[in-house]
Image (cartoon, rainbow, N blue to C red):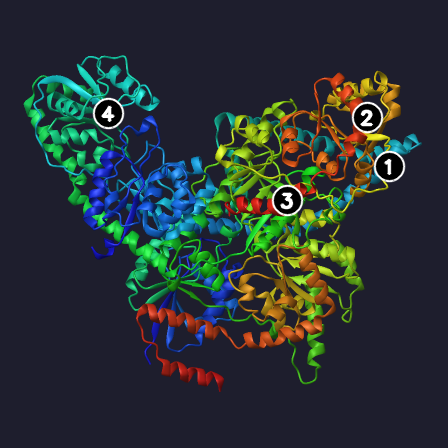
Amino acid sequence: MKEFKNVRVMWLLNHSTLRKFEIAQLNQLGIKEIFLPKFFPDDEANLSASVDDSLDASLTIPPSDLNILNQQNWYECPSDDAWKIANKYFDIAIMGFFPKQMSAVIDHFNGAVVLRAFGLSKGLSYSQLIYQSLGANFIDKIKRLKNRFWFGAAYSHLYQVEGELLQRRHCFLPVGLTCTSIRDQWEGKNKQILFICPRINSSPYFHAIYQQFIDDFDEFEFAIGGAQPIPVKDKRVLGFISNEEHQQNMKNFRVMFYHSTEPNHIHYHPFEAIRMGMPLVFMAGGLLDTLGGAKLPGRCRSLKEAKRKIKAIFADDWTLINSIRKSQNILLTTLNPEYCHSYFFEAYSHIIYQLNQHRLTYFPKVQKKKIALILPVLYSGGSFRGAKQLANILQEAAQSTGEKLELVFAHLDDSNFYSNDKFNDLSPTIKRRTYKWQTLDHKAARRAMIYAGYSDWQSEKINYIVPDDGINQFLDCDLWIMISDRLTNPLLPIKPYICMVYNYLSRYFLFLNDSLESSFFGAAQNASKVLVTTQFTAENAIQYAGVKPEKIEIMPMLTPDMSEYCISSAVSSKKKYFLWTTNTALHKNHVRAFLALKKYYEELDGQLNCHISGCDTDILNRQTMSKLQHLLDSYAVYENSNCLKTALHFCGELSNSDYVKKLQNAAFVWHPAYRDNGTFTVIEAAQLGVPSLSSDYPAMQEINQQFGLDLNWMDASDPLDMALKLKLMEEQYINRENKWPLDLTKFKHNSEAGFKYWRVIKECL
Amino acid sequence: MSIKHYGIWIAYPPTVDLRCEGLGRHLAAFLKGAAEKRDVKFTIACPSWGQQSIKELCESEDVPGDSIKMLYPQRYNILILIYEKFLLRSKKTKRWKPFIEFFSRPYNYLLKCRTILTENIATSRNIGHFIFQGFFLLPFLIAQVIHFSFLKSYRIFHKAFNHINKQLNFPIEKFLKFISKPKNSFLLVSLFAIIQKKEMELMLDLIDKAKHIKAWYSPTAFWPEFNLINAPKLMCIPDVVLAEFPIGFSNVNDERFVELFKKVEQAIYTGENFVTYSEEIKQNTVVKRYNRKAENIHVISHAPNNLNHLITIQGNSLNGERASSYYCQELFALALNKSNNLEYILQFKKGLSKDTHLKFFFYASQFRPSKNILTLLRAYKHLLNHSSIGHKLILTGNPDVCEEIKEFINFHHLEKDVLILTGLSLKELAACYKLADVVVNPSLSEGGCPFTLTEALSVKTPVIMANIPVTTEVITDPNLQELMLFDPYDWQSLADRLEWAVYNKEELLKLQLPVYEQLNLRTWRHVVDEYLSILDQLAGIVPDTLQQNKEIEAELA
């Protein structure tokens, strides 16, 4: 066993009976250094789990390192330091089907990885579960492990129901018992059936089994064993009992009935009964058939047959009892440690050989990465500017760290909307690519996934979408970054993608139908990571859209750089207007804003004009505005006020330079919107020495805090308060201007932000 | 001299014409190269229906008939026999064409009469005239009523038929589809698959008995059954293009491709020794995607495809170059007749003469998702609109298989500038290569370096190509790479290269011709030698180097 001598194993499970058996098998192979986890999930399903630190003494790694390993929860995501230690000292990691554990091990461990599989219910497969719980991209990650990954099936036939990948990576690691000798202590004096069914009140699966059993066997005397984390109000259910009591029960009860017809999974207790010499009556079609029970006298094809046999056993039919007892020992053959040893030897020899081959031939290559930043809809305002900024800072960050990165900036194919001049501020090294959304029906989607190597993927939706660049649908890129969740159909999971999410306004305003909103939720849920810029949006993503918290990353806001526009001395101190940047979206709070303005001019004698700029703002004073249902009331306010008609100037969408001029000459910026992701206008204004009056809501509070803007606040739900604050700003803006400029260094952190974005994005590559 | 026997496995389903398959030309070149070897004899194992197709391929590609042996199940499958009769019957319907043409003339004449009569009656101011002409129009009106009634009844019948079909859930539609287009029917494809499987079992029995054949070669990975041969085997994996363009191919041939793809994957997973045409397919497809051992994968690149002999006119009394040029113009004129926009071409050709040089770019390729035609079209449209270049763009391929290409051409009104010529003969293809100003290949993926390179240079036309690994394996000079290769994901890059190539074609050709000369040193004989060397190795045969050297010397002499 020379090849096993220097092998160290991380056995990342806590099942007590299994541990006893497998550690003994590994020891028998010659593997003496085994790490066992010291924490396991506090899940009632882990009733058979326990912690064992007895093997720590045999590990020859430094105690400080062992200490770090022992502090980790290996079912979640251990620390980077822990993985460094694991990779330094260990060769094989053995994991169970715990999605977070699998994800962490596959992502971080450099040795051989064995996924232990003990079978699932009929009709289910591990391949399906991987797709469901970890997504198609996880399959890709497993594939990248090549010969380092193994599907360690406990039963030799398990791989047959699996998909192509697990079939190919299958190795047989039988499950067994440390001892299979027959104790033959059974007496059977108690004429009752012993039925084992744990977790009756905490697992719907076991509850159904319990219900079925008591319905079927109500004519018999019986007791139900198995741990019950929630007590069952049925005297026949034994609940928690000591091992001694359990052994005693098996000794005294007349017969054990095993109900399962699952072909791929079995429990330990039938084997315990056999060892005790207790007659086992079991249903045909289950795994016991495969293990040699197909012709046993205890096997029953129907419930009727089972009842008949149990009745005969109760009626002291010793011929039947003895024939069952005598013949059933064959079921222990495949659980015999000696029998299992040869398979363990074969499997681990192979695992170690392939690992050594990998280590000999593996040379890490620095490969150029290609990322597509995709604008999913026609964005023109802040989102568009932000996307370009993100592209630029990512490129810079990658360049300055010496990493090879090619960025593709993708937008919808609409040359009227996206004219070339709109990309002047995009780094010339970033290539632009146009695309249109292509819809694939579920059949075509499945075919595409099969061709892409996800042969077991099953479509769950009727249609899927892919960005079609007319070349190869961006499959030349390693990662997609969707610059919002506005995807009208689920994205085909053929590439990992990151989703930027700006807000969940639909939580506060009813403007999306359920189907569309569900698509947006799906876009975020299925992403590898969800990037948000405020804690407020992060909370909404978790609480409203159902995004897993571990997927969410709060990223720095990318501030617009206004340094080229210095605070001009020519800017007059006496200003004639304040600036309201808005658009026609529902959350811009137009009605209250118009009402506030009306009060400001008509009741408070407001002296400053209001200049309104932003996308589509030129229609806010026109009849066309009345076509938008949510602007009807605003239009009515405007139409009935001569003061508003005189004081309001509708500028529409301004060019960048016009916008800056407009901003520079404003007395202050007015932001009366309601609960969005905040506006950058206040940041831009601050850089130009212009103060702002804003609605008080979480995202704006975060912006205020992050950049130290010293914003003035108003209550966006109260037009009177808004008007009063406008008047106050009119009176005080000069005093406030004198406090500016603020600490401009706060706005200069884009390169730092770039590194942060790059670090997070790299994790998905 | 002892003769070595090797086998080639070909197991296409019925109705496949090898002459139309990409593999066909490669196989023919291989067989021609093999025919020159005196110490090797190849046997082709094929289904009973395949031998005819192989014979036709050999005839069309001038492969000496006696150089190969055939091994196939002797008795023909009855269903296939019936199907082929059925196919032949549908082909015979073409015989009605002259009759249809004959009757269409009087029919058109009658239609004209009806129009004139209608016009006369509608504008008539004379009652006698009105009745007289009305008398002649009456038969037309009766015919019209009958026609209308028939149409109405047909619609009612069709509606009722559909209703019954839905109620009974009877696959009438599928049945009708099968009758009208049997080859595309899923039922037929499934039947073929069953028949093909059985036929392959028979082939395996025959191969089992042919013990003198020491090793077998499969020129493609379509047939996992090849791996069941009980002798050393070598399988060629030209590429797995579906895996590289999964979305693009998801709507091509539906489930038929899925079945084919699964077979290819199974063949790769169960095979042991492989050949690819390029290092790229070896590393990125077979090793990386399918995790097969690199040491069992051999790379054998193609020999160049020379088209020059097809268009070279020789004769003492002729100026060869001029005669060849005229010949090319003639061939090109014929090729233009195969355009998708024939009406325009017929008018346009009036302005063409033997001395007129039509300026065009040329890309000879099928329309497949991997061929990147849209990028070429985008670049071409840009050049047409934003530069002084007024060339046409000539493509080959079937435009009906790619809706996007048609849409792009129509949307940008390029119908008269992008000409798609389908069904070109090899000579016409050579003429297009010869007369093009620049040949361009934007393909994103190929099994080996695209034949475009040597086909264009063999007729002394400069070529620009996509910067893809299979091409940079052959074009290794960084300077030349910079001049002739473009980023296939960036139409602007293609446009820049194409524009440069148009204005600097002599310079480009001057740099490219030495590369071609170098590549041209390799012949199909060399290719075959490399295959044989691997087969020898697998069969455990020590190569007779002395004999080989003698043959090479003889060849050089």
Q: Residue at x 14, y 38 (%)?
A: A179
* Mark closer to the observer (2, 4): 2
Task: Say which mark, if any, is on residue B455.
Answer: none
Q: Which residue is mark 4?
A: A259
Q: Which residue is mark 1?
A: A572
Q: Residue B366: horizontal and vertical position, in percent? A: 59, 56
Contact (Cβ within 8 Å) of mark 2 with mark 4 = no
In the rendered image, the vertical position of residue A414 relative to residue B361, given as above or below: above
A422 relative to A256 in the view: left or right: right
Q: Which residue is mark 3?
A: A749
Badge 3 marks a residue whose secondary structure is: loop
A532 relative to A294 in the view: left or right: right
- The alpha-carbon separation of the residues under discs 2 and 4 comes to 81 Å
- The alpha-carbon separation of the residues under discs 3 and 1 comes to 30 Å
Q: Which residue is mark 2?
A: A730
Chain of the residue under label 2? A
Contact (Cβ within 8 Å) of mark 3 with mark 2 = no
* Mark closer to the observer (4, 3): 3
Contact (Cβ within 8 Å) of mark 1 with mark 2 = no
Q: Residues within 10 Å of mark 4 (few under 14, many from 20)?
A: many
- The alpha-carbon separation of the residues under discs 1 and 2 comes to 15 Å
Chain of the residue under label 1? A
Contact (Cβ within 8 Å) of mark 3 with mark 1 = no
Q: Confirm whether residue B428 shows in the render.
A: no
A481 relative to A271 in the view: left or right: right
A122 relative to A677 in the view: left or right: left
* Mark sitting earlier along the chain (1/2): 1
Nearer to me, A107 or A214: A107
